[in-house]
């Protein structure tokens, strides 16, 4: 297998990874020169080494834009480096790691905010009043104005309010996690686009050089043909 020596690490790499300095984007080329001043446009570098400097360039870009990198930005850069999907790194709460009290609060809030609860509670109140006013008119255990019923309703409202607030707080936590995931996905998409632009620029420059080489060969062939024609003439 044919190999070449990298100008920055002095290590051997397959010839298929060979890249020259004149095909590297200026911003990344300048980043390499900062660490290796002897690196020039004719120097050689491997694709794997160039990818490391692309990651450094993206990290520097983030630092310039948002200041010090947070844990979210570092995770995004890590997924880029490891070629991972962002949705595999950030998972929303699926119910497996919540406590019994939180699960109960979710169920109570879900039931308390439904038409089923309203209808059942209305039926309960009507039955309570009917029993105390009609069925047990003379021996009612909660005669009008239904003091016991009012006490039950007050206790129920006092308990239901913090349970609903607990469920709302958990919903806000889920919303924050979704916002973090959306931010990470958008940030990774932006960085991927910037990397894609850099690769396209490299490809265009490489193709232009190949076309120039082909044109030079064609010009040389035409010159040889013209010389042969002149000699025969």
Image (cartoon, grey):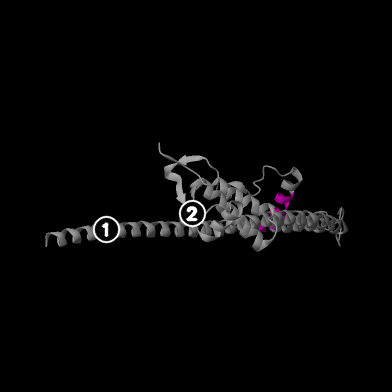
Q: Does residue 199 appear in the picture of this structure?
A: no
Q: Quadrant of residue 125?
A: bottom right
Residue picked out by circle 2: 21
Q: Residues within 10 Å of mark 2 (few under 14, many from 20)?
A: some
Image disc number at residue 220: 1
Q: Residue furthest left?
A: 233
Q: Position of residue 161 (x, y in %)?
A: 79, 57
Of residues 192 and 55, the one nearer the viewer is 55
For the stretch drawn in magenta, the main secondary structure is helix
Label 2 residue SS: helix
The residue nearer to you, when weighing 198 against 208, is: 208
Q: Quadrant of residue 210?
A: bottom left
Q: Is residue 206 left or right of residue 231?
A: right
Which residue: 45% across, 58% down? 200
Specify whether residue 109 is painted magenta. Answer: yes
User: Mark 1–mark 2 contact, CB under 8 Å?
Assistant: no
Q: Nearer the N terminus, badge 1 or badge 2? A: 2
* Tag of residue 173: none
Does the image show residue 203?
Answer: yes
| Residue 211 pos. (x, y %) | 34, 59
Residue at the (61%, 60%) spot, across then down: 61
Q: Quadrant of the N terminus?
A: top left
Position of the C terminus, as image quadrant, is: bottom left
In percent of width and height, residue 228 lies at 17, 58
Q: For the residues marked 1 and 2, what is the alpha-carbon distance in whole angstroms? A: 27 Å
Q: Position of residue 23 (x, y in %)?
A: 46, 56
- For label 1, count other residues whose C-alpha is less than 10 Å away and answer few (under 14), some (14-19) or many (20+): few
Q: Secondary structure at mark 1?
A: helix
Q: Magenta region: which residues?
A: 105-115
Residue at image location 58% in from the left, 48% down from the top: 79
Single out the mark in the foreground, 1 or 2: 1
Is 82 colored magenta in this rendering? no
């Amino acid at each position: 297998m044919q190999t070449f020596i990298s100008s920055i690490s002095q290590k051997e790499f397959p010839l298929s990874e060979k890249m020259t300095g004149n095909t590297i984007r200026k911003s990344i080329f300048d980043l390499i020169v900062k660490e290796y001043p002897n690196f020039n446009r004719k120097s050689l570098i491997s694709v794997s080494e160039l990818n490391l400097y692309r990651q450094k360039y993206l990290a520097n870009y983030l630092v310039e834009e948002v200041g010090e990198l947070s844990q979210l930005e570092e995770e995004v850069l890590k997924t880029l480096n490891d070629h991972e999907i962002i949705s595999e790194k950030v998972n929303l709460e699926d119910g497996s790691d919540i406590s019994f009290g939180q699960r109960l609060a979710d169920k109570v809030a879900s039931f308390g905010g439904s038409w089923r609860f309203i209808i059942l509670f209305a039926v309960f109140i009507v039955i309570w009043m009917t029993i105390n006013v009609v069925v047990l008119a003379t021996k009612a255990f909660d005669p009008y104005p239904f003091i016991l019923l009012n006490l039950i309703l007050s206790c129920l409202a006092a308990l239901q309010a913090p349970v609903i607030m607990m469920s709302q707080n958990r919903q806000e936590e889920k919303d924050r996690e979704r916002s973090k995931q959306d931010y990470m996905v958008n940030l990774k998409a932006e960085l991927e686009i910037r990397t894609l632009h850099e690769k396209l620029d490299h490809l265009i420059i490489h193709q232009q050089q190949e076309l120039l080489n082909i044109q030079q060969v064609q010009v040389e062939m035409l010159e040889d043909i013209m010389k042969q024609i002149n000699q025969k003439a």
